[in-house]
Amino acid sequence: MRGTAIDRIVVINDLARPMGGASALALSSARAFRALGHDVTLLAGDAGDDGSLAAEGIACVALGQGRLLSRPRMEAALAALWNRRAAQMVARWIAQHDTPRTVYHLHGWLQILSPAVFHALGPVRDRLVISAHDFFLACPNGAFADLRTGQPCPLVPLSRGCITANCDRHSRSHKLLRVLRHAIQTRVFDPAHAPPVLAIHAAMAPLLMRAGIPAQAIHALPNPVVPWSPTRIAAEDNREVLFVGRLEETKGPDLAAAAARAAGVPLRLVGSGALEATLRARHPEARFSGRLSPAEIARVAQRARLLVMPSRYPEPYGLVAMEAARSGIPVILPPTALLAADLVRHGAGLAIDPRDTPDFAAQLAALAQDHARIRAMSEAAFALPDDLALSPDAWVARLLDFYAARLAARSVAEHAQAQDQPCDERRQRAADGPDTSPPSAGWPGLGRTGRTRPLSTAELASGARRSRSRSSE
């Protein structure tokens, strides 16, 4: 499949300089595609390339804007709803550079690019793939949870109950802003006719479907995982409880510190963030390692007995949990994490409510003494099946398969319908400047492409077979 004729891969993301897992995945995919010989362009909302992308041969077009949280409140609110400049940047690139075999992959858009990016991508929707790294494609607060309590939300997005629910961790006004943004996004995205949505865990599908995204448009693509150790870490011989992540309220490092103190077990926190100073002052008994490179984390992990991932809110995946488990380190995580059921089923972890400090501490204390149980959990974790996570190479190959199938299925549709407009006509239409105004209805460009539904799984598979046939000629 990697020999399939793709003219260019366009990766679209808020950030060219990763600050979290989703952006890191977007950038790592771009680098991997380029290493395989593909032409790659990154369209980013921030300041763009620091020179490293260009050094690898990746073109970068940047908007030069800051994240919403770094901007004045009113300016941020307006940009969150509709970033006209972002739409212009994407539409202009498409008008000037698009070809019939260019594919587009949208990763993150809510920190800078805004729902306007869906409008700009309308003309190339039949060659678009979207990654669902979280639930913002379907839920106004991105979590399908009450962010004040951490409890799962049963409501239908944008229903009366959803709109009136006080579920935002900031304020009611902030929730209303998110509802308005999501309503705009729903109008231009048109969930019922979604392009392929790549969910990082299969259990995301029912929640995405609750927002109207068809089941046939959702495809599970687990995150790529590089274990911290190629051999099993003998967790039963270690004492430290390990936390790896941002030291922020959402990730629950304070919950881990409180439970570790109550249990009398040593805790190491790897990461930085807004809670760091407070945690250092309140928990001098904990060890703080700051932000570490992957190689440095791997060295620290050799001394870990357990990894704790005490997130206050639902985690669609939990990359550090899989990195630890695949290295033989048992994991404690909340039942709201989608990986929890998998790890518990295979005997590799425990699911507990991290807000329940007495129970959290009791579990830590018990596991600190039970060497046989830790060894059994460690061995089970190290032997986890491959379907829970992919190797980086397998992940990239799967992405390329999706792109190739998208192109092949589009070719089938062109022959059957002969309704897609040539790229030259799109360029001519854009000569006076791209239309980046908020649309009045539906997905912009839907009438131009003639497509009235997403490609089904069968069509994707058919496209993949056709692509394999062409690539072997």
Image: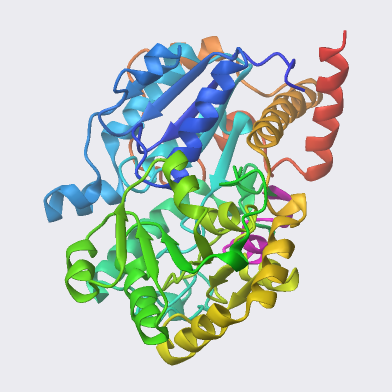
Q: Position of residue 458 (x, y in %)?
A: 84, 41
- Determine which quarter of the picture holds residue 431: top left
Q: Quadrant of residue 464?
A: top right
| Quarter containing the C terminus | top right
Left or right side of 332 for 288: left
Q: Give the x, y percent position of residue 127.
A: 62, 29
Quadrant of the rendered image containing residue 183: bottom left
Instruction: Give the colour scheme of this rendering.
Output: rainbow
> Residue at image x 55%, y 74%?
336
Q: Is residue 76 above or below residue 150?
A: above
- Report the residue that reaches farthest toward the bottom: 358
**Rendering coords of residue 221 (x, y %):** 67, 46
Instruction: Identify the residue shown where x is 70% and y is 56%.
Output: 382
Residue 387 within the magenta-colored segment of the rendering:
no
Residue 154 in view here: no
Q: Quadrant of the N terminus?
A: top right
421 or 54: nearer the viewer? 54
Tell which of 125 and 277 is nearer to you.
Answer: 277
Residue drawn 71% across the image and 35% down it: 394
Give the prevailing secondary structure in the magenta stretch: helix
- Residue 210 or residue 268, whichever sits in front: 268
- Is residue 206 located in the magenta-colored stretch of the structure? yes
Image-based side of 107 in relation to 2, left or right = left
Which range of residues does the magenta coloring cover? 203-219
